[in-house]
Image (spheres, grey):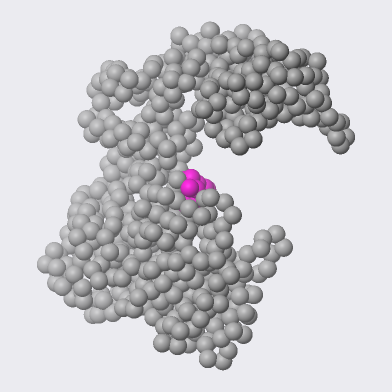
Amino acid sequence: MLNKEVTNIKGVGEKFAEDLEIMGISTVENLFNYFPYKYDFFEVKPLSELIHEDKVTIEGRVVHEPSLTFYGKKKSRLTFTIEVENIAIKAVMFNRAFAKKHIHAGEIVTLTGKWDAHRLQITVSNYKTGPADVHAKIQPVYSVKGKVTNAKLRKTIQSAINGYGKEIPELLPEQFLNQYKLPTRRNAYEVMHFPPNRKALKHARRRFVYEEFLIFQLKMQLLRKYKREATQGNQQQYDPQKIQEFIQLFPFSLTEAQNKALKQILADMKSPFRMNRLLQGDVGSGKTAVAAICLYASVTAGKQGALMVPTEILAEQHFQSLQELFGDKAKIGLLTGSVKGKKRKELVAAIERDEIHIVVGTHALIQDDVRFHDLGFAIVDEQHRFGVEQRRALRDKGLLPDVLFMTATPIPRTLAITAFGDMDVSVIDEMPVGRKAVETYWTKENTIERVLEFMQKHVMQGEQAYVICPLIEESDKLDIQNAVDLYHQLNEYYLPSIEVGLMHGRLSNEEKDTVMKKFAANEIQILVSTTVVEVGVNVPNATIMVIYDAERFGLSQLHQLRGRVGRGKSQSYCILISDPKGEVGKERMRIMTETTNGFELSEQDLKLRGPGDFFGKKQSGIPEFKVADMVHDYRALETARKDAAEIIDLNLLETKEDYYQLKCYLEENSFIEDKLD
């Protein structure tokens, strides 16, 4: 019944239906789900409870006749004083000259507008003569387009509730309604559109938050289940004895967190289902060591391994470190865009003949002519930098290889269980013993001379430094330090004793490689760069990271940049040069100087920035919720995830009558088939 066209609602003709269609409303159900984007609260509160710059409603007696002044072209300002709780409050109204006729000394008025607590002044947006209406306390405000007005939309929704309210199905089993004290779906819809009071609105919202999260988590859990069932048959019979011997060759002991992650991954490799796991670990936590052990496990099982990374520099670095680690235990190949002609042909043929056991490469790995003999284990590093199609292409190279996605971007738990709900997640949240924390300082640009001297002192002791800028070249729009200018300034400042290099995104891959190789070999002592150094290159000799205009970066990005230093034995430093104007920028700098834990930072960043910026909105896989907010409602998200897992594990959708409506809804709105192509 709810999928009936809106023309079935009393008062909706063809013309109005066309207007609603522009807003994405074509059915009765669409209309019910078109929630207000905000609510205006017209309840009168005591002055002591009013918050500065909030929209408030006050009621009082007009002290004197309003004063009207005109300025500019057809612009006016009406001012008067009202007495509220024996206090004189100034009221200002712009471009409402006609209101002078309605407002008279000695009368009671109700005013709604922006409150200025410092001046005891209200800038009026709505006014009403007489006392406040006790029935019109909360006004829903909708996002409307074209000829649709808020008043007409509200009237239409009221007609729909009167005509079809009884048809609204209850999706949640009774146990959840009772357990979490949630209103029924019909009641919640009515309250969201016509809230009688704040308390009822809060409970209605709570109901839809939980419902949205539960449905999303059920889809994720089902997807996970189907993926597992659809991908049987890649049971890797690795050699535990050889793996132990390999681990003992490492010059360090694995941390507890590394051991735990390794155990989870090896268990997946042994299971009859294909692995789909995310390995999260802070910069320097030792993900690469775990990855190497798993690649070796696959080699002992007679399979091939692949490691796909986002840049050539990173691919070369991994290739070299794996070669050192494996020695003669496995043959490693490097396949990037720079490998061309005869060399490439020979390498591709060797991969197909199983003469190469582990291939490290960029997206060159997923080109059509690259065929593996038997790919058993694939790792995608910094996975959010690859598109879904690129990841799938690598996965499809082998006979259902186990896939491990790795990221050094610490993703908050809230996001991980949402964006990666169809994956298993392993976390390395512990740093290797003896690794020194990078000391972080925040300073303003007027102290730059001291920063330059500090860098010079350390560079003269044989150390190296990064200097990061947000822009490549000067911009008219933004007054931000740019890489090209800064490079010239520093070059002049440090001549002739210190070599300064420049790196940015507009250089070709070959040019970037050349610069990075020179820096790694200490032929360049100070590298001025944009954020292209964020992921990857390991230069243990670099001990200083200076970041200009640091307030322009998110916390996670600042943390990634900071992770480029602190990789050697010497104490390392991160200096944030920043003069933030807003409170968020100042808070960001404060958090950076106090926190070195990437996961804590990522939680803070999520609160400051919201989820979209974490991965870039397009590929994030983060759903758009109508009511729920992943950051503020994270407890409900955790609860819904737990409940969804139980529903799927106990097969309640198939076996319990109470879950029938939920099952029908999931089938009608299923996206599972789309994801399993």
Identify the image quadrant of residue 444: bottom right
Instruction: Pinpoint residue 188: horizontal percent, then vertical percent.
Output: 44, 18
The residue shown at (23%, 68%) is 433
Q: 469 left or right of 465?
A: right
Residue 613 magenta-highlighted: yes
Give 466 or 425, whichever is nearer the viewer.
Answer: 466
Q: Position of residue 66 (x, y in %)?
A: 77, 22
Q: State left or right for residue 619 relative to residue 213.
A: right
Where are the magenta residues, as a range? 608-618
Up-down relation of residue 48 to residue 582 (above or below): above
Query: In which quadrant of the rendered view does residue 598 lie?
Result: bottom left
Q: Is 593 contained in the magenta span?
A: no
- Is residue 529 visible from the viewing direction of this image? no
What residue is at 44 percent from the left and 75 percent from the top? 544
Q: Dividing the picture into quarters, in which one does residue 127 lie?
A: top right
Q: Which residue is situated farthest in the left direction here?
A: 241
Which of 668 and 167 lies nearest the eye of the viewer? 167
The answer, for residue 255, to whether it is visible in the render is yes
